[in-house]
Image (cartoon, rainbow, N blue to C red):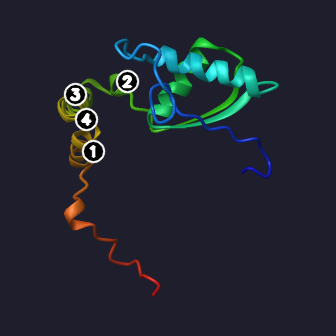
Amino acid sequence: MTDAFTVVTYDRRGLSRSTLDDPTRPVTMTDHADDVAGLLAEVADGPALMAGFSMGAEIGLRTVARHPGLLSTLIAHEPVMPNLLAEGDRAEHLAELADIQHAYAAGGLSAAFPAIARHLGIDPAHDETEGDLTHSP
């Protein structure tokens, strides 16, 4: 992709090398969308193409809503947006997210990852490949 486009990645506010001005203030999706807008104002010379995955997809959707015309294309892959689900599915997914948030609040990222794996049906103790796949030596 880099041979045809300028590719920009960044550390979201409060993650990795990005620090918070006020660690007691929660970071909102609006903050993330405004950060995307600020970054693109510095590096882009027109509407940008954005690919967002999971939470990045949700940030992209918020960016489109808050900053019309900033993006020419958004590929929003699997945004975490259970409130858009039908009522029957919504409660289950909201409960899953609440469980993950509770695990994170109680024990940080190391506690959240097992909760995420459990809700996705991933069992790290049984990391088996699909039966019809072969492995190269």
Answer with mark 3 or mark 1, whichever residue precedes in sequence: 3
Task: Residue type at mark 4: give it.
Answer: Gly
Secondary-structure class at tag 1 = helix
The label on residue 108 is 4
Above or below, comparing residue 63 to residue 101 in the picture: above
Tag 3 secondary structure? helix
Q: Are marks 1 and 2 in contact (CB under 8 Å)?
A: no
Q: CA distance from mark 1 to mark 4?
A: 9 Å
Q: Residue at x 26, y 31 (%)?
A: 97
Query: What distance separates the C-alpha of mark 2 from that of mark 4?
Result: 27 Å
**Residue denoted by label 2:** 84
Q: Position of residue 79 (x, y in %)?
A: 44, 33
Residue at image point 33% right, 27% down: 82
CB-based contact (under 8 Å), mark 3 and mark 2? no
Q: Is residue 62 left or right of residue 103?
A: right
Residue 73 appears in which quarter of the rendering? top right
